[in-house]
Amino acid sequence: MRAERNGHSAARSAALAADPRNGSTPAAAPARVVDLDAAERAAADLLAALGAESDSAHLRETPRRVAQAYAELLTPVPFNATTFPNQEGYDELVLVRDIPFQSLCAHHLLPFYGTAHVAYLPGERIIGLSKLGRVVDLFARDLQLQERLTTQVADWLERRLHPRGVGVIVQAEHLCMSLRGVQKPGALTVTSALRGIVKDDSRTRQEFLSLVAQGR
Ligand code: ZN
């Protein structure tokens, strides 16, 4: 049993290479597969290595559940990145704030989760607002580093939309930091990626930061 796996390098290159003038193009193409059988065997080995009693009724189906849970967490949902001509010449920031997401830390395979704030300053095209949420998931469903996730969302918007500027802020709690190691529950890691006018023009950058800060 093999599950089709989207996202990652091939899908990302496809997403990045797509012509933004097409209006509606797939944001991800099938790229990598999760081998559910192999993952299930590995989960059973891990349980055994951890000293778990595999004949316990509660653990019997656990390797299969673990494999399916990881497959789900690592499989982005494909979507069409619909863009429209900026006919009204809208030239202020478009921001979607407090986009919830969850991801898996590449170092510990433990979840990190929080919110992303994604903004762009339109050029010749605008994009459906829901896509700003979907693009976060496209890259969050991966073995990730928060820094890389933040950069990937900004890069995707830049290349797909050719906007005049992009601002992405991600804030997340990492369970590898809350539950183990330094054990600091509630500590938030904040990362940002600013591009174009949002980076270079101090007034626009301040406007982005204050819009993100509003409501909190
Ligand atoms: Zn970690």
Image: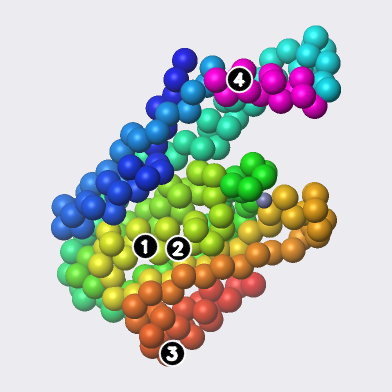
* Count of residue discs: 4
Q: Secondary structure at mark 4?
A: helix
Question: Which tag, 1 or 4, sits closer to the chain's start?
Answer: 4
Kind of residue at disc 3:
Ser
Label disc, if present, on residue 40 of the rendered structure:
4
Q: Is residue 199 left or right of residue 163?
A: right
Q: Disc 1 and disc 4: Cα gap in Å?
A: 35 Å
Q: Is residue 7 visible?
A: yes
Q: Is residue 172 left or right of residue 166?
A: right
Question: Within 10 angstroms of label 2, few (less than 14), some, or many (20 or more) residues?
Answer: many
Colour treatment of the image: rainbow
State the image coordinates of residue 11 (x, y, percent, origin top left). Answer: 33, 43
Kind of residue at disc 1:
Asp
Q: Is mark 2 within 8 Å of ligand 1?
A: no
Q: Is residue 195 left or right of residue 44?
A: left
| Residue 22 vertical placement versus 79 (above, below) | below
Q: Residue under label 3, please give it.
A: 202
Q: Residue under label 1, please give it.
A: 155
Q: Which residues are magenta?
A: 38-50
Q: Is mark 3 within 8 Å of ligand 1?
A: no
Kind of residue at disc 2:
Thr
Question: Which tag, 1 or 3, sits closer to the chain's start?
Answer: 1
Kindly check if marks 1 and 2 are in contact, taking CB atoms under 8 A apart as contact. Answer: yes
Question: Which tag, 3 or 4, sits closer to the chain's start?
Answer: 4
Question: Which tag, 4 or 2, sits closer to the chain's start?
Answer: 4
